Image (cartoon, rainbow, N blue to C red):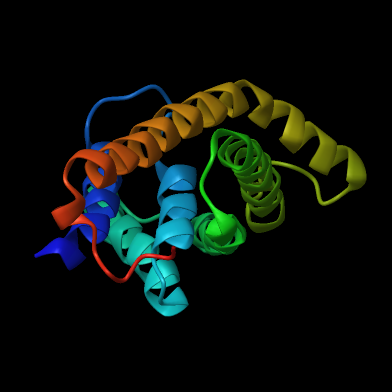
Amino acid sequence: MNKLIIPAIIIFAAFTRLMPHPPNFTPIIAMGLFGGAYLKDKRWAILLPVIAMFLADFFLGFHGTMVWVYGSLIIITAMGFLMKSGVNLKNGALATLGGSLLFFLVTNFGVWTSGSFYPKTMEGLITCYAAGLPFFGNTLAGSVFYSALMFFGYEQIKRYFPIAVPDTIQE
């Protein structure tokens, strides 16, 4: 039972995307960082957030930039591996900020390169990034909110219910 707590947190976070929310205020970055930081098996750390995203996207609808979203999620999960030495406020904040920035850069590049909205010129790329800036604030806010909720919540579970801590986490 205790081995299901981390996957349950990630899957629950993914399904919060089905609830009404401001654009880009989602748990995507937090899910990747959390899985990367706490799951010992790197395959599951990568697969679990991707599978959870896919299940949520099944209900929300698939789109042309999924490869960019999922690709950035995999890279963000790998960033979570760097938190192996210990989850703390400093490395959590840096990872959340870095993950949000990486997600912005990768997904907007994907919009530019995969779509027909912007010319395939440097000016078109800059215009695409400029058009995405209003969404970056929500991406960062959602990442901070969900990272705080997931990491702090799990640390509280570890503290007050040590029996619930699985032996598959990185210590």
In this view, the residue in front, 64 or 95, is: 95
Q: Residue at x 20, y 51 (%)?
A: 162
Q: Position of residue 90 (x, y in %)?
A: 63, 35
Q: Is residue 3 left or right of residue 127?
A: left
Q: Residue at x 28, y 37 (%)?
A: 156
Q: Can residue 4 be spotted in the picture? A: yes
Q: Position of residue 20 (x, y in %)?
A: 25, 25
Q: Position of residue 98 (x, y in %)?
A: 67, 42
From the viewer's perspective, is residue 139 above or below residue 112? Answer: above
Q: Residue at x 53, y 31 (%)?
A: 139
Residue found at the very far right of the displayed protein: 122
Q: Can residue 64 be spotted in the picture? A: no
Q: Residue at x 25, y 60 (%)?
A: 7
Q: Position of residue 81 (x, y in %)?
A: 56, 63
In this view, the residue in front, 66 or 92, is: 92
Which quarter of the rendered picture does the C terminus lie within? Answer: bottom left
Residue found at the very far left of the displayed protein: 1
Q: Residue 94's quadrant in the figure? A: top right
Q: Is residue 2 left or right of residue 165?
A: left
Which quarter of the rendered picture does the N terminus lie within? Answer: bottom left
Q: Residue 96's quadrant in the figure? A: top right
Q: Is residue 21 left or right of residue 163?
A: right
From the viewer's perspective, is residue 48 above or below residue 143? Answer: below
